Structures are given as structure tokens and as C-alpha cells.
Amino acid sequence: MSSRSGLSVRQMSMVDRLARLVTANHMAAPAIFMLESSRPLARTGSQLMVFFAPIAHAFFPAVDFNELALLLDEPQALDLILQFIEYFEEARAQGRDPLAVEAPYFRPDPHAAQA
């Protein structure tokens, strides 16, 4: 099963969790900088995983690391992670807890049943 973004529900959950943790720890600016600067490496999985390894181990158990590698290999994943971080950072700037804010893309697609 996949969402409107083309990612699986598990991958969307991982994007949500990563963005919330980054924002809750006030690391949105460095994370956005790192993700934007790594965009040219997005399709070279081994190089990208080396780049993300220290951060990934801080946020994810080793079991999820392979899932993260698969997620980052998806072309739309970086854009989605950035959108989620920006969304939760905006909520945090407004005084709301980024861990309690509803995710922007987890609402069911009303057109999915018609397809």
C-alpha cells in the first residue's frame, strides 16, 4: 500500500518521525542545509548512506537503517523530508509542539477510492 507521494506507509511514517525528531531538537536549519547540500548524491546510495550514517544512528535503531537507505533512494523522499521539517518547524515557531502536530500528508486521499 502506498500514499499519494508514492512512498509506502512505513516510509511515510519514517519521514514523519525523522522530521519531528529533527524539529523537536531544534536541528531544522542544519538538517535542511545537509539535505539540500546532499541532493546531488541522492541517487548514489552508498555515498549517501556514508553521509547520513552519523545522523541516522542518532535517530534510528540499526534495524531501521536499511529502511532509511531504501527511503533515501526514492527520488521524492528528500523533497518530502524537507517539506515535513519545514512544516513542523513552522509549527514549533508558532509555539506548538512538533511532536503533537498532525502530519501534513497523512490524511486519506479522497480520490483514491475513485481510481
Image (tube, grey):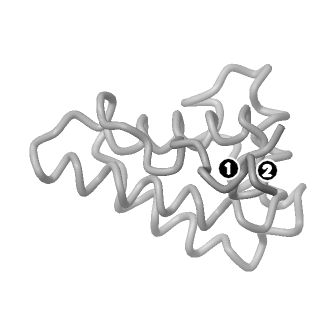
Closer-to-camera residue (103/97): 103
- The x, y position of residue 104, in whole percent, is 44, 50
- The x, y position of residue 46, in whole percent, is 89, 55
Residue drawn at (67%, 50%) of the image: 52
- Whether residue 112 sits left or right of residue 70 in the image: it is left
Rendered image quadrant of residue 102: top left
Callout 1: 10 Å neighbours few (<14), some, many (20+)? some
Residue drawn at (33%, 30%) of the image: 99
Give me the C-alpha separation between circle 1 and circle 2. Answer: 5 Å
The residue lying furthest to the left in this view is 95
Residue tagged 2: 49
* Tags 1 and 2 touching, CB below 8 Å: yes
Rendered image quadrant of residue 56: top right
- Whether residue 96 sits left or right of residue 10 in the image: it is left
Where residue 61 is drawn, which disc sits there?
none
Q: Secondary structure at mark 2?
A: helix
- The x, y position of residue 95, in whole percent, is 10, 43
Residue drawn at (78%, 72%) of the image: 41
Q: Measured along the vertical axis of the image, is residue 101 above or below residue 5?
A: above
Closer-to-camera residue (3/55): 3
Residue tagged 1: 52
- Whether residue 111 sits left or right of residue 55 in the image: it is right
- Whether residue 98 sits left or right of residue 95 in the image: it is right
